[in-house]
Image: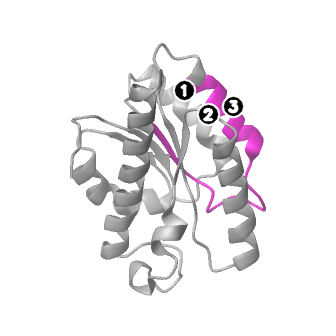
Amino acid sequence: FRTYGFKLTVIGDSLTSSAKGSMSLYFPNSFVNSKGSRELRDALTVLNEMKENNEIADGIVLALGTNSTKTIDVDALEAVYNEIQTYDKKIPMILLSIVLPYKMQEKERNEALKSFVDTHEFCFLADWYAGAKTHKECFMDDNIHPTGIGNDLYAQVIYKAYVEGFDYINNKP
């Protein structure tokens, strides 16, 4: 695989914490800020803190949504997207789909994430759901948190979405 030598800014929850090692193989020297039970409503605050610390890289990943109380906080996504649009260069915003043992919540949240991506330029979906849902070996007994194999797949789906976003932005007329 190719890393392009780029770095990511990643804001995530406990799943991201678990996958940090795998992500460092795909995106060396990235800025990863992860915390258990983090929700989307915290994303803008964390992004602004990372900006103050000069931790804005070539792509911004929001690996959040698992801990949302009921639905995806679209207002929080919109606030982060709007902030990113103020930056001097175009940076892909990557949203990670989710896997939950609760089918209705999982479906509603993933539909909201896909809808957001479909209606916002420079926004891309890292489809963790499509890549991992049918692979039980990717999950611990809670059917949410990734195993070692799952951590690798988690990083791979982010990598794929980043390459798509990077290629789109750099080949846009």
Residue 156 place in picture, x, y as percent:
34, 59
Residue 70 visible in the shown view: yes
The answer to whether marks 1 and 2 mark residues whose Cβ atoms lie closer than 8 Å is: yes
Pick whichever of labels 1 and 3 is earlier in the sequence. Answer: 1
> In the displayed structure, would residue 30 be above or below residue 139?
above
Helix, strand or loop at mark 1? helix
Taking depth in this image into account, of 12 and 149 the one nearest to the observer is 149
The residue labelled by disc 2 is: 44
Q: Which residues are magenta?
A: 60-84
Residue 52 place in picture, x, y as percent:
46, 20
How far apart are labels 1 and 2 at the CA level? 6 Å
Amino acid type shown at disc 1:
Asn
Helix, strand or loop at mark 2? helix
Residue 53 place in picture, x, y as percent:
40, 24
Residue 58 place in picture, x, y as percent:
37, 30
The residue labelled by disc 1 is: 48
Label count reads 3
Amino acid type shown at disc 2:
Leu
Asked if residue 137 lies left or right of residue 145, the reply is: left
Q: Nearer the viewer, mark 3 or mark 2?
A: 3
Helix, strand or loop at mark 3? helix
Neighbours of disc 1 within 10 Å: few (<14), some (14-19), many (20+): some
The answer to whether marks 3 and 2 mark residues whose Cβ atoms lie closer than 8 Å is: yes
Image quadrant where residue 122 sits: top right
How far apart are labels 3 and 2 at the CA level? 7 Å
> In the displayed structure, would residue 106 be above or below residue 97?
below
Tell whether position 4 is magenta. no
The residue labelled by disc 3 is: 79
Neighbours of disc 3 within 10 Å: few (<14), some (14-19), many (20+): some
Asked if residue 82 lies left or right of residue 89, the reply is: right
- At x 74%, y 48%, the residue is 73
How far apart are labels 1 and 3 at the CA level? 11 Å
